Image: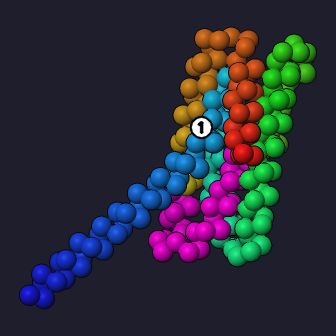
Amino acid sequence: MGNGTGGRRLGVASQLLWGQFIAVVLMAVALGLDALSMGLGIGMKGIRKRDILTISLIIAFFHIVMPLAGMLMGGYVGKLLGQVATVGGGILLILLGAHMVYHSLNGSENRSLDHRSVGGMTMYALSVSIDSFSVGISLGMFSGDPVLTVLTFGAVAGLMAMTGLLLGSRVAGWIGEYGEALGGVILLAFGIRFLI
């Protein structure tokens, strides 16, 4: 009789763990969609394989740090900053996208923000990771392991960014000189989505 009850408890606990894991993965994919879209946009500019890995790792890092920062902030201040951060991320993506479109269509020798520089990589990574700060605020109430949760966020975002960058670089070969303009339009669209 006791063994049957213990087995049922173990089964229920296992189902709860799987349910939490699926919820974390779904949250991670939702947060990683911005990284995927940004990757497509930057990849269409043309990108080296080494830069794909570096940008993906930086995005993964930010997707770990930003939710942790949100968890530490918590409460009212965190919610207020979370809304500001999301709006800031949207504005940043709009500016980066508009800058890419302008320089592509203008045909000037000045390139748009260089994704190969440390500042450029950080700017792109921050713009798509900033919404994970808001998610971090609510993670404090999440009963699962917060460290494992943010590590999952980082891993999924890094993989999605890498996928976007690889796809974007492939597409860039097909569409040629219009790649940067199209990439900028994608960043603009996602920036506007942040603000709506």
Task: Name the residue located 55 percent from the left edge and 40 percent from the top edge.
Answer: 160
Task: Name the residue located 62 percent from the left edge and 13 percent from the top edge.
Answer: 173
Q: Range of the magenta residues?
A: 124-152
Residue 106 is covered by the magenta coloring = no
Q: Quadrant of the N terminus?
A: bottom left
Q: Is residue 60 above or below residue 176?
A: below
**Residue furthest to the bottom:** 2
SS at mark 1 in the image: helix
> Is any atom of residue 124 visible in this view?
no
Q: Specify whether 23 is left or right of 122.
A: left
Overall secondary structure of the magenta section: helix
* Amino acid of disc 1: Leu
Count neighbours of disc 1 (C-alpha within 10 A) and say few if under 14, some if 14 to 19, many if 20 or more: many
Tell me which corner region of the image, top left, top right, bottom left or bottom right, holds residue 184: top right
Tell me which corner region of the image, top left, top right, bottom left or bottom right, holds residue 163: top right
Residue 135 is covered by the magenta coloring = yes
Q: Is residue 50 above or below residue 119?
A: above
Q: Specify whether 92 is left or right of 169.
A: right
Task: Name the residue located 40 percent from the left edge and 57 percent from the top edge.
Answer: 22
* Image coordinates for residue 20, horizontal then vertical, percent: 41, 65
Please give the residue where the numbered disc 1 appears in the rendered image: 36
Tell me which corner region of the image, top left, top right, bottom left or bottom right, holds residue 13: bottom left
> Is any atom of residue 145 visible in this view?
yes
Q: Is residue 98 above or below residue 131?
A: above
Q: Quadrant of the C terminus?
A: top right
* Image coordinates for residue 52, horizontal then vertical, percent: 63, 34
**Residue furthest to the left:** 1
Q: Specify whether 139 is left or right of 42.
A: left
* Image coordinates for residue 38, horizontal then vertical, percent: 67, 36
Residue placed most toward the observer, 48 or 186: 186
